[in-house]
Amino acid sequence: MALVAIVGRPNVGKSTLFNRLVGMRQAIVDETAGVTRDRHYGKCEWCGKEFSVVDTGGWTSNSDDVFEEAIRKQVVIAIEEADVVLFMVEAGTGVTDYDAEIADLLRRSRKPVVLCVNKVDSGEKVFDVYQFYSLGLGECWSISAANGSGTGDLLDEILRVLPKEEGADSDEHAELPHIAIVGRPNVGKSSMTNALLGEDRNIVTPVAGTTRDSISTYYNKFGHEFMLVDTAGIRKKAKVHEDLEFYSVLRSIRAIEHADVCILMIDATAGMEAQDMNIFSLIQKNKKGCVIVVNKWDLFEKDSNTMRDYIAALKERIAPSDDIPIIFTSVLNKQRIIDVLNAAAQVYTNMTRKISTSQLNDAMLPEIENYPPPAWKGKYVKIKYITQLPTRTPSFAFFCNLPQWVKDPYKRYLENRLRAHFDFSGCPIQIFMRGK
């Protein structure tokens, strides 16, 4: 699919236009300059043709922003990747030094450029557009990304300059599993994404809260194929003071809701803290597969039984949901990061596993006979038949004479027996009692 990169200086409305083109509020939009940091991808459809759109951070130089150099690097990578560059400027402020700098970069890139003048909200502002012809990038297209005026003509021009593609498959990644990397701020989520991809896809700094959006990337290496989602760190509500961080946390929660498997990263030196438990509970509540990754293991003081004791303490903390793969990594030293991929792939396989009714009954009926449900008011519950339900996560129906009298402790016993007979490591299991 053809790729269109939106570039420009900070706060000209790149993310607003990106959201309009992809048809959803995917990128965070705020009046604060410098909100977008990483490259952010989406899909746009116009006149029956689809193309990818990438939103980039605002280009600056000699500013106070600690992320300036990393953002500039991301912008350059986006321009190199793109088939067409959508250069965005703002009508009200005129041609700035940053605009001239970007125009120079684009002329040297020799990529097709569509010059787009944003914030032309009224008829009077149309006269401010003509000064941008001085950039030497050809025709100027005036739009208002906020209310959508002029975007139709802009899209027509983008389609005109896009390279012709043959046999493009628009939904090639639609059915792939989504694996989200989640956790508290500064535990190494973006570093893990970059290490797996083998490139600096997302900005990494020692500053907590560097990643703001949930960044989705297609992954196809080492025999694995899926969508990898890097998310912003989730902090306690009481500690979230900025609107931007509030939006970032919402995006991360939405990424968990849309994921198939979540990789929960924790800091080895801090252990499983209360906020890690909150994120773990969120994953469990949404019935998602889970892999726990203990990062920064190289900084932890070890002796002969350290890993065994750490796993025991971790499982005690997350009980009764303790059938979850735990991987110890050092992303900085690239230790065991392939194990994380293998574990996530295995959890997805477990989640999609279908067990035949005959196998289920052969395994579970003897277990139920050995340890039947407790009697209730002198009446005995008799489970006669088990089958797997056609749901996204493993769910099982147990048909019996008195389903309302089977309580949670016995359901947990049934779940543990299912896990003992079949590999459901890392997956949530749902048990339903039904009248026969």
Image (cartoon, rainbow, N blue to C red):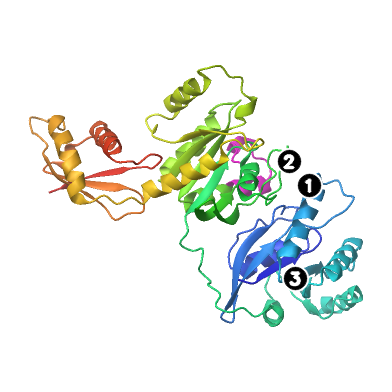
- Residue 82 can be seen, yes or no: yes
Q: Residue furthest left?
A: 378
Task: Estimate the spatial distance between the alpha carbons at disc 1 and disc 2, rounded to whole Å.
Answer: 8 Å
- Residue 286 can be seen, yes or no: no
Q: Residue furthest front?
A: 222
Image location (x, y in percent) of residue 111: 78, 72
Q: Secondary structure at mark 1?
A: loop
Image location (x, y in percent) of residue 411: 25, 36
Residue at the (57%, 34%) spot, across then down? 329
Figure quadrant of the N terminus: bottom right
Task: Estimate the spatial distance between the alpha carbons at disc 1 and disc 3, rounded to whole Å.
Answer: 22 Å
Label of residue 2 in the image? none
Q: Amino acid at mark 2?
A: Thr
Nearer the N terminus, badge 3 or badge 2? Answer: 3
Image location (x, y in percent) of residue 334: 63, 38
Asked if labels 2 and 1 touch by Cβ distance under 8 angstroms, the answer is: yes
Q: Is residue 322 left or right of residue 18?
A: left
Segment tinted magenta in the rendering: 233-249
In this view of the protein, which residue sits in the foreground, 242 or 317? Answer: 317
Q: Counting other residues with Cα less than 10 Å from the Cα at mark 3, is it few (<14), some (14-19), or many (20 or more)?
A: many
Q: Secondary structure at mark 3?
A: strand
Residue 239 part of the magenta segment: yes
Label of residue 67 in the image? 1
Q: Which residue is mark 2?
A: 205
Residue at the (75%, 70%) spot, across then down? 85
Total count of labels: 3
Image location (x, y in percent) of residue 41: 63, 61
Q: Amino acid at mark 3?
A: Leu
Q: Which residue is mark 3?
A: 86
Q: Is residue 3 left or right of residue 411?
A: right
Q: Amino acid at mark 1?
A: Phe
The picture quadrant where one finds residue 328 is: top right
